[in-house]
Image (spheres, rainbow, N blue to C red):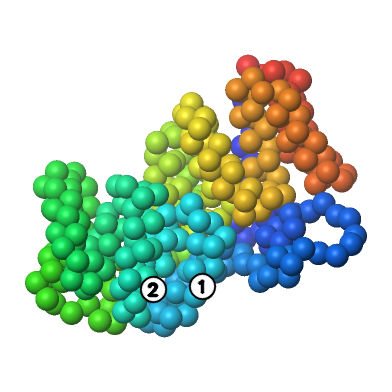
């Protein structure tokens, strides 16, 4: 079985600088740059951390700017949209909060804080659809098996807002709790997830990775492990989606490139896997473990050692 390699969160994205990963993604060639190349580029994981720090300081306008940078860089990340919703609500930008939470709910239909945030935004906008969110939350509260107090608290806040209670300057205490705001908890969840993956406890690993992603935002290491875990569960479409998200943020991420190549081998797409291998050979000018591992997969037509 393949030895699982831990990609440290503290490192730049697998050997490339964050700025380089987010700007051109490697490659070269001279000549004039396209106009878009001079536009500001953001590291979504760093901007996510800035937004959290600003929320802790109740500086919601700064938080919203950083959270917007995250959603610009990683538009398919539900945590980023939820964070933008919290920031906009804190600065009483209820229309912005509604839009952000609607995006979050679309990406993560069962996410409780996103539904609660949407309910609060709609209630403050005097939109009757807030009642739909309250009904949804109460239904979840009536059938919950864990975190019932949190679900009930979220429902109570939406109900209070519908009754005219003000939310000015304080989007929701419940929405600001938990691993969303504590990087230490994210570190612990990340390390725990890797351990669970090594033990093939994939469902538990996915829960820990969700906690890590909520703390760190769209970090390519976390997204890569989410892809790996879904792949091990046989959910290839979900795995591909996470690999693509990781590579959209960090195009030269070696782990995501290798694992995406392995997925292609498992799907029988050897030609596609060779494209990933060629990319790794370009990234790793002097060779790297990821390239050699993918080469073994291609040569074996599947996981080596099976």
**Viewer-closest of 57 and 185:** 57
**Viewer-closest of 190 and 301:** 301
Q: CA distance from mark 2 to mark 1?
A: 9 Å
Which quadrant of the figure has residue 214? bottom left
| Percent of width and height locating residue 238 | 48, 36
Question: Which residue is painted at 13% across and 53% down in the image?
Answer: 135
| Percent of width and height locating residue 169 | 29, 82
Q: Are marks 2 and 1 in contact (CB under 8 Å)?
A: yes
| SS at mark 1 in the image | helix
Q: Earlier along the polypeptide chain: callout 2 or callout 1?
A: 1
Describe residue 291's horizontal placement relative to residue 222 as left or right.
right
| Percent of width and height locating residue 224 | 57, 44
Q: Residue furthest right?
A: 30
Describe residue 86's horizontal placement relative to residue 259 as left or right.
left
Which quadrant of the figure has residue 164? bottom left
| SS at mark 2 in the image | helix
| Percent of width and height locating residue 268 | 64, 20
Residue 87, which numbered label?
A: 2
Question: Which residue is painted at 39% across and 73% down in the image?
Answer: 87
Q: Residues within 10 Å of mark 1 (few under 14, many from 20)?
A: many
Circle 1 sits on which residue? 66
State whether residue 17 appears in this view. no
Describe residue 241's horizontal placement relative to residue 201 as left or right.
right
Question: Which residue is painted at 70% across and 65% down in the image?
Answer: 36
């Amino acid at each position: 079985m393949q030895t699982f390699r831990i990609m440290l969160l503290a490192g730049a994205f697998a050997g490339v600088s964050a700025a380089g990963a987010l700007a051109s993604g490697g490659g070269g060639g001279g000549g004039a740059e396209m106009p878009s190349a001079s536009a500001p580029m953001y590291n979504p994981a760093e901007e996510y951390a800035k937004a959290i720090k600003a929320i802790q300081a109740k500086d919601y306008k700064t938080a919203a700017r950083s959270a917007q940078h995250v959603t610009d860089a990683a538009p398919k990340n539900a945590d980023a949209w939820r964070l933008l919703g919290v920031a906009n609500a804190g600065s009483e930008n209820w229309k912005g909060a509604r839009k952000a939470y609607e995006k979050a709910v679309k990406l993560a239909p069962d996410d409780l804080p996103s539904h609660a945030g949407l309910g609060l935004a709609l209630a403050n906008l005097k939109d009757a659809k807030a009642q739909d969110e309250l009904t949804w939350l109460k239904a979840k509260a009536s059938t919950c098996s864990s975190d019932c107090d949190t679900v009930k608290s979220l429902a109570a806040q939406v109900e209070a807002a519908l009754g005219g209670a003000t939310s000015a300057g304080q989007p929701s205490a419940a929405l600001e709790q938990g691993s969303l705001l504590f990087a230490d908890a994210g570190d612990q969840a990340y390390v725990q997830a890797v351990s669970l993956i090594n033990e093939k406890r994939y469902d538990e690993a996915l829960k820990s990775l969700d906690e890590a992603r909520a703390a760190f935002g769209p970090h390519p290491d976390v997204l890569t492990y989410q892809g790996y875990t879904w792949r091990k569960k046989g959910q290839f479409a979900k795995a591909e989606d996470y690999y693509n998200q990781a590579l959209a943020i960090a195009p030269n991420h070696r782990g995501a490139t290798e694992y995406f190549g392995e997925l292609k081998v498992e799907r029988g797409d050897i030609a596609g896997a060779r494209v990933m291998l060629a990319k790794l050979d370009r990234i790793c000018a002097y060779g790297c473990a990821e390239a050699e591992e993918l080469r073994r997969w291609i040569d074996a037509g599947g996981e080596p050692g099976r």
